[in-house]
Image: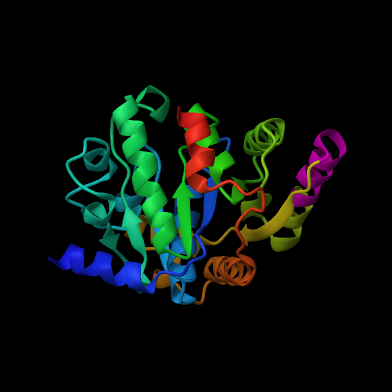
Amino acid sequence: MKNETLYLQRMMEASRRPAVVLAIASGKGGVGKTNIAANLGICLAACGKRVVLFDADMALGNLDVIMNFTSTYNISHVLSGQRSMEEVIHVGPEGLEIICGASGVEDLANLSEFQRRRLVSELTKLQEQNDAIIIDTAAGISKSVVAFSLASDHVLVVTTPEATAITDAYAMIKVLVGNSFGGRISLIVNMAESIVAGKKIYQQIASVAWRFLGAKVDCAGVIAWDERLRRSVRMRKPVVLAYPKSSASASIAALATKLSRGMAVRTDNESFLKRIANWFF
């Protein structure tokens, strides 16, 4: 009954404008992508937005671990038809709605037609009921990562100062451009030595992307190395809640404010449903 009431309430409150879909991606694992997704989701929700955070890693979903809660149901129950998306939502800090990924489920490219259609249908409902959907993609550039990214309005690519992370972040940008991505691409430099050093890394990547790909890459922000961020991970508590006055929290809050002011859907006249279906079917 509670879920039905929530569903009806959200349907009545929903704006006619579809939710902006933000995909957070990285060519490499271990760059803090999921941590950024969780903290960004909390900050956007605190700005008064209706936000859903979706862990799209079907094999190694760990959003529940990072945010320290146990969810009875996850995306695997939606794919099987046992539960609707509304029924697997966990309400987190600031009203952020969280959909946990699964563990050991087949990659989206290997899902059955029923499972793919089920996923597309449920995600489309979410877009009609919210202001923003944050998709925490799996690491790498698998077909499912590319599909979610290309169907989004805005892709936030996360990198660190490591040479391999920079190379893989550029590879992700190259894949997006090569597939004629019609949305916005931004770069987040995480674990930078300093804000200045992080901006230099952004400028290097943006310059190469413009020169060789003809692509404009915006600077989403820089998150400088902060020991309190590492501590919060060990505590299994988002840094914006554990250490709200830390430099990492300030950087993520600034990104959320920037996004909340400039969120806009793509203008290519294709819905999220159609874009995602183009890749899954």
Rendered location of residue 213, percent (x, y): 80, 35
Relative to 156, is 100 on the left or the right?
Answer: left
Q: Is residue 35 above or below residue 178?
A: below
Rendered location of residue 187, percent (x, y): 67, 51
Rendered location of residue 69, percent (x, y): 24, 57
Q: Which residues are magenta?
A: 202-214
Query: What residue lies at 36% left-to-right and 44% top-to-bottom?
Result: 121
Query: What residue lies at 26% left-to-right and 64% top-to-bottom?
Result: 7
Q: Is residue 190 above or below residue 108?
A: below
State whether residue 59 appears in this view: no
Relative to 214, is 135 on the left or the right?
Answer: left
Residue 95 vs residue 223, the one in the foreground = 95
Rendered location of residue 159, percent (x, y): 62, 45
Relative to 281, is 7 on the left or the right?
Answer: left
Q: Main secondary structure of the magenta part?
A: helix
- Residue 149, by quadrant, is top right
Residue 17 vs residue 179, the one in the foreground = 17
